[in-house]
Amino acid sequence: TSILLINGPNLNLLGTREPGTYGSTTLPQVIEAAEKQCSSKSITFASLQSNHEGVIIDRIHEARGNVDAIVINPGAFTHTSVAIRDALLGVDIPFVEIHISNVHKREAFRHHSYLSDKAEAVICGLGVYGYEAAIEYASRHIKPKEK
Ligand code: DQA
């Protein structure tokens, strides 16, 4: 099994960015924990953080045929990007959408996601624990495709 973790714009600032909303854990800490979690399950792990929509789309395309599940926190692209939605549908890789904060408790423009209706699961408001939960779910419930 192989999992790709994608973090979108501004998530590189995790730990220092609006800590009241996103907590004090940094992105390197999140990625290290995810790596450990995957290696303990013999899951191949890869990760990308980018502030650029096109870079995220290119990475999703590269995942075609070699990644079984994508865990994605699209950041603000959640609420704007038809292109990321189309990329995920285009490669036909099941994905879990995760948000650190409870987007439904926040501004109305965060209530809509271009991904949620196509996601296997949507996690929000669990803080960075959401990443662990998403990986756990993906590893248990998303079966590798026959190649
Ligand atoms: C976020 C929520 C988004 O609305 C916001 O733009 C982010 C982070 C979250 O993890 O809670 O950048 O995806």
Image (cartoon, rainbow, N blue to C red):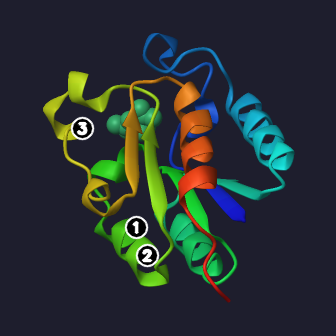
Q: Residue at x 29, y 31 (%)?
A: 103
Q: Name the quadrant where ligand 1 sits.
A: top left
Say what amino acid the circle numbered 3 marks: Arg
Quote the CA–CA distance across marks 3 and 2. 21 Å
Dot label at residue 87: 2
**Badge 1 local density, few (<14 within 10 Å), some, or many (20+)?**
many
Quadrant containing the N terminus is bottom right
Say what amino acid the circle numbered 2 marks: Ala
Do we see residue 141 in this rendering?
yes
What kind of element bears circle 2?
A: helix
Quote the CA–CA distance across marks 3 and 1. 16 Å
Cβ–Cβ below 8 Å for labels 2 and 1?
Answer: yes
- The residue carrying mark 3 is 110
x and y percentages locating residue 146 in the rendered image = 64, 85
Considering every residue shown, the one lying at the far bottom of the view is 147
Q: Which residue is drawn at 66% across and 20% down?
A: 25
Q: Quadrant of residue 20?
A: top left
Above or below residue 130? Residue 68 is: below
Relative horizontal placement of residue 27, taking residue 117 as reference (left or right): right
- The residue carrying mark 1 is 84
**Badge 2 local density, few (<14 within 10 Å), some, or many (20+)?**
some
What kind of element bears circle 3?
A: helix
Cβ–Cβ below 8 Å for labels 3 and 1?
Answer: no
